[in-house]
Amino acid sequence: MASIVKRTTSLGVRYDVRFRVSGKQRKRSFRRRGDADAYRRTVEGDELSGVVVDPRAGSMTFADYVGTWLATRLVRGRPLTPATIGGYRGLLRRHIIDDLGPVQIRAITPATVREWHAGVSERAGADQAAKAYRLLRAVLATAEADDLIRANPCRIRGGGQERAPERPMVPTSLVLDLAEAMPDRFRALVLLAGFGGLRTGECLGLRRVDLDLLHATVRVVEQAQEVAGHGRITLEPKSDAGKRTVALPSPVVAALDAHLAAFTGPRPTDPVFTSPSGTPLRRATLSKHWQSAVRATGAPDGLHLHDLRHHAATIVARMPGVSTKELMARIGHASPRAALIYQHATAERDQAIAAFLGEQMAGAERAPRAPVVPIGSSGCAMDVPSSPA
């Protein structure tokens, strides 16, 4: 429980309210006894509800706190990757620091967050606001866990949900056309994305040792990213589910076999996909050739290489009897959310098929049936055969 200690200083009498937070002694001084009594009652009430916070700790600004947060943040026991830190710094710079950086974290209220969120939504759009909100909520959740604030002020229902439109579903024939339109050096990568479901970074991170063409599999253990200030880096997938072995269809195996012979070095650790100079393939180089292939094939504007992963997952989801767990394992997701999205797309396609079948049934020509005529007085009826011509 809290206590009050009266003491005399060179500035006069002071009343110290003393209490403990996480086993450490804390105090706050007041000039008047009444103010000290009121604060003691507040602290004791907070002790009973388990929300005691250090009155000084929350005085640091959000900008100061988030710098420490980035340096010490752990996800599943691992520090943030340089790519993730770079992404977070971008969100902070564009949408958060100017508005909330100078504010003491204990002064960030739900009203402050709502006003900030509305401003970001207006100037940058709902998707950027959702991304920035999720980051702010995570930072302040840690501040709450550290007993620096009483409760997380991020309480906007659905504030972190992105509502981006579903990516386009391309037909299998277009995926094959896109592969043919790419230079020989990059053709196998397109097939691997379109039918193996690998992310672009996972394709770029592959080494010769990760391909087992004898057993028609590819092992995903690394991904390649490009981070400002770091250049090209390779790191493990974000989740354990991202580490996986994917079985490949025989045409993709044949394309990879030809690719290894023509474009990949002989050592086990040599990158599978390289630039014409033999260095690991960069996203910028790949993107340039991809855009050319999109134009050459008449593919939809804005089609991304990553959309081929969507094609691969949706095709698998259409396979009769495939389970959500099997789809999750193949695309490397730890939760069923993404798998259910692909299966939802499949269900919509199934409805379209049912509608088509109904149209066929309605338009079918049927042989004429003889009329039914009553006979006798009992009201019974029977089919009367048609007279032979």
Image (cartoon, grey):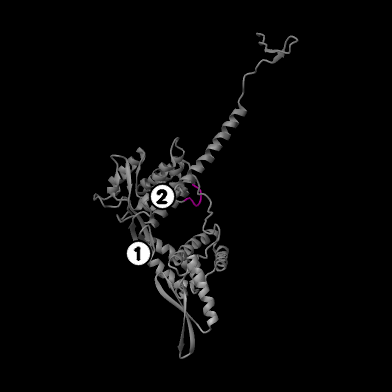
Q: Look at mark 1 in the image and give the residue it sits on.
A: 230
Mark 1: which amino acid?
His
Q: Look at mark 2 in the image and give the residue it sits on.
A: 334
Q: Quadrant of residue 371?
A: top right
Magenta stretch? 299-303
In the picture, measured across the screen, residue 375 lies left or right of residue 31, that is: right
Secondary structure of the residue carrying numbered label 1: loop
Image quadrant where one finds the C terminus: top right
Q: Residues within 10 Å of mark 2 (few under 14, many from 20)?
A: some
Question: For the point 62% across and 23% down, which residue is it?
Answer: 365
Q: Residues within 10 Å of mark 1 (few under 14, many from 20)?
A: few
Secondary structure of the residue carrying numbered label 2: loop
Q: Nearer the viewer, residue 172 or 198?
A: 198
Q: Quadrant of residue 157?
A: bottom right
**In x, y percent, where is residue 327?**
42, 43
Q: Nearer the viewer, residue 207 or 183?
A: 207
Q: Nearer the viewer, residue 308 or 114?
A: 114
**In x, y percent, where is residue 378?**
74, 11
